[in-house]
């Protein structure tokens, strides 16, 4: 895919949507003092539409920006890597835009399993085993919401090629 100005403008827009989806559409979680959000759906769509590279940028930077702006600065490096690789995984496994619904669901689920695992490790390192275990249910809910949103939006947008001239 040619990385022209249009690609980068759409990527910036999708990065902003990841941040907004993470910050605005969220449900606080008491166990982890974090929140469940719909930003993952936008990460998946970014990766689906523009590929794994922009999936990493939109997912990592958008999520890290949301952490910064919401006062969760301790999570910035973790989110940059974890959510960035959600975008890489979703983008890599959906390079073929004609992949069926089952294939997309499977690809997006693998990406979200990575997210749950990544935040489990992050919580384990920062807060210990109890907090890591407590983070799993809310991250599973967030991942499920991301998969559902990603599959539904990708079905609607699968014919969109944002890099067309």
Image (spheres, grey):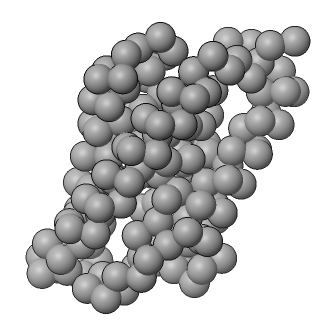
In the image, residue 23 sits, relative to residue 60, either above or below, namely: below
Please identify the quadrant where the N terminus is shown. top right
Image quarter where the C terminus lies is top right
As displayed, is residue 31 above or below residue 55? below
User: Which percent across, then down, holds residue 72?
Assistant: 51, 79
Residue at the spot 51% in from the left edge and 15% down from the top edge: 97
Q: Does any portion of residue 52 appear in the rendered image?
A: no
Q: Is residue 10 left or right of residue 51?
A: right
Is 114 on the left-hand or right-hand side of 82? left
For residue 149, side relative to residue 50 (left or right): left
- Answer whether residue 130 is visible to the viewer in this image: yes
Is 159 left or right of 146, judged from the image as shown? Answer: right
- The structure residue drawn at horizontal position 42% and vertical position 82%, both measured from the top left corner, is 28
Residue at image coords 49%, 59%: 38
> Which residue occupies the foreground of this view, 126 or 143?
143
Relative depth, front residue between 37 and 113: 37
Is residue 52 shown above or below 113? above
């Amino acid at each position: 895919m040619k990385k022209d100005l249009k690609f980068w403008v759409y990527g910036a827009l999708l990065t902003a949507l990841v941040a907004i989806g993470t910050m605005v559409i969220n449900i606080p979680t008491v166990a982890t003092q974090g929140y469940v959000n719909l930003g993952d759906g936008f990460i998946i769509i970014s990766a689906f539409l523009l590929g794994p590279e922009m999936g990493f940028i939109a997912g990592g930077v958008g999520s890290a920006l949301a952490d910064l702006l919401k006062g969760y600065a301790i999570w910035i490096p973790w989110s940059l890597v974890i959510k960035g690789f959600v975008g890489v995984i979703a983008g890599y496994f959906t390079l073929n835009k004609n992949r069926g619904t089952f294939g997309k669901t499977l690809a997006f689920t693998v990406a979200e399993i990575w997210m749950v695992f990544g935040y489990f490790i992050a919580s384990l390192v920062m807060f210990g085993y109890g907090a890591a275990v407590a983070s799993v249910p809310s991250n599973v809910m967030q991942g499920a919401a991301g998969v559902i949103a990603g599959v539904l939006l990708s079905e609607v947008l699968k014919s969109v090629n944002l890099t067309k001239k």
